[in-house]
Image: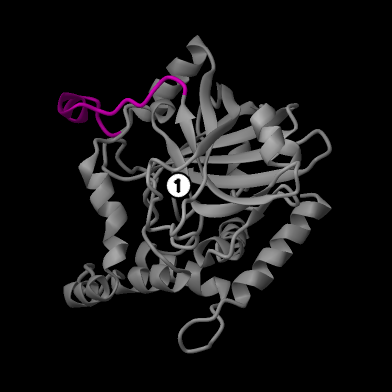
């Protein structure tokens, strides 16, 4: 880990530690990991979220529009190396590939000078919690009781108090699962601030759009493919040629909420394609260089900075705590 990465993590830890909760007590990053462990068990071998996944490698090349909209080196137009991880949502390393849950696209960009930019994107345009406090409360409401099941009344009270916590689940229920990791869009549901060559700072979210188009499972495929088809499908696909995604920025309109990731911006908002991610190889088996990376959603100052979205500001520090627990 280089000095720049260490500095970013330290800043993220301090930012997360300073988040205020209604009681004015600081939310400790370890509390977030503790809440996951209360539901999922101790964080040991596997990462607590999206543990089922496939490690890949490739590169990213920003285009002229990307260079115009961000002074970050990732958008320089040079080929930027990328470590890529595709994942399946949940805490189970044996999660089903046909579940109506999110798929993940996590990326570490690394320039020739060693500058790193980590990000995590999901196959849904919205997140399941408005704040880190809501995330923790939702997890604790669902922790198993003595009978191994969560308290239904506690879950009901949480949902009643936080109706927007159901929005992502409703969206996932409305669409079929992806037919491939290569044929689903992946959204960054939080707002980032892009500093352009003109000095202007523009808030934006983004989506990685599959060049092959969006393809979802049919009902027949959901019955016949089984729970573990994604890895082999991706290996076969990449063996036949690169898998590509266009990175598309979306800009807000007047009245759009910049800090609430449970609400998607309308589709008619302005967009700009800023580069292309190319996947050129995948690991033959489990593991790989992804295992030691938490993909902690860092900024890439001065060209890409995190907004004040509390769920974004609070992520890096718990990721670091989780990584330390499973590698200690």
Q: Residue at x 31, y 53 (%)?
A: 168
Q: Nearer the viewer, residue 43 or 62?
A: 62
Specify the quadrant of the image occupied by residue 186: top left
Q: Is residue 327 above or below residue 276?
A: below
Most extreme residue toward the front is 254
Residue 95 visible here:
yes
**10 Å neighbourhood of mark 1: few (<14), some, or many (≥20)?**
many
Q: Nearer the viewer, residue 142 or 38?
A: 142
Q: Is residue 46 above or below residue 231?
A: below
Residue 297 visible here:
no
State the count of labels. Answer: 1
In reply to whether residue 170 is colored magenta, the answer given is no
Q: Nearer the viewer, residue 198 or 127?
A: 198
Residue 212 appears at what percent x and percent y?
42, 19
Going by the image, does 280 lie left or right of 222?
Answer: right
Specify the quadrant of the image occupied by residue 198: top right
Quadrant where the C terminus sits is bottom right
Residue 101 appears at what percent x and percent y?
31, 45
Q: Residue at x 37, y 74 (%)?
A: 137
Q: Residue at x 44, y 16 (%)?
A: 236
Q: Which residues are magenta?
A: 211-227
Q: Residue at x 70, y 36 (%)?
A: 68
- SS class, disc 1: loop
Q: Is residue 206 above or below residue 316?
A: above
Magenta: predominant secondary structure element?
Answer: loop
Residue 251 appears at what percent x and percent y?
52, 46
Looking at the picture, the colour scheme in use is: one colour
Q: Check disc 1 and report the residue beneath it.
A: 51
Most extreme residue toward the bottom is 23
Residue 311 appears at what percent x and percent y?
50, 64
Going by the image, does 148 lie left or right of 326?
Answer: left
In reply to whether residue 219 is colored magenta, the answer given is yes
């Amino acid at each position: 880990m280089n000095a720049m990465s260490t500095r970013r993590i330290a800043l993220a830890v301090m930012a997360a530690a300073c988040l205020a909760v209604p009681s004015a007590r600081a939310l400790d990053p370890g509390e977030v990991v503790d809440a996951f462990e209360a539901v999922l068990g101790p964080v040991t071998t596997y990462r607590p979220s999206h543990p089922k996944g496939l490690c890949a490698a490739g590169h990213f090349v920003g285009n002229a529009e990307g260079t115009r909209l961000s002074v970050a080196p990732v958008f320089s137009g040079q080929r930027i190396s990328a470590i890529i991880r595709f994942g399946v949502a949940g805490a189970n390393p044996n999660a089903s590939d046909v579940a109506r849950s999110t798929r993940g696209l996590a990326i570490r960009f690394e320039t020739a000078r060693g500058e790193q930019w980590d990000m995590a994107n999901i196959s849904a345009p919205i997140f399941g919690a408005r704040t880190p406090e809501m995330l923790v409360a939702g997890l604790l409401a669902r922790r198993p009781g003595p009978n191994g099941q969560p308290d239904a009344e506690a879950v009901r009270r949480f949902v009643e108090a936080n109706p927007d916590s159901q929005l992502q689940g409703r969206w996932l229920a409305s669409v079929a699962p992806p037919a491939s990791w290569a044929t689903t869009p992946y959204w960054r549901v939080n707002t980032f601030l892009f500093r352009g060559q003109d000095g202007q700072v523009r808030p934006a979210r983004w989506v990685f759009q599959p060049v092959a188009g969006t393809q979802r499972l049919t009902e027949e495929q959901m019955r016949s493919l089984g729970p573990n088809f994604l890895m082999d499908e991706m290996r076969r696909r990449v063996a036949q040629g690169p898998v590509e995604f266009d990175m598309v920025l979306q800009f807000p309109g007047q009245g759009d909420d910049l800090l609430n990731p449970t609400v998607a911006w309308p589709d008619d908002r302005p967009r700009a394609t800023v580069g292309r991610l190319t996947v050129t190889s995948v690991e033959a088996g489990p593991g790989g260089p992804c295992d030691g990376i938490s993909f902690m959603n860092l900024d890439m100052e001065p060209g890409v900075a995190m907004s004040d979205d509390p769920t974004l500001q609070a992520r890096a520090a718990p990721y670091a705590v989780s990584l330390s627990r499973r590698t200690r």
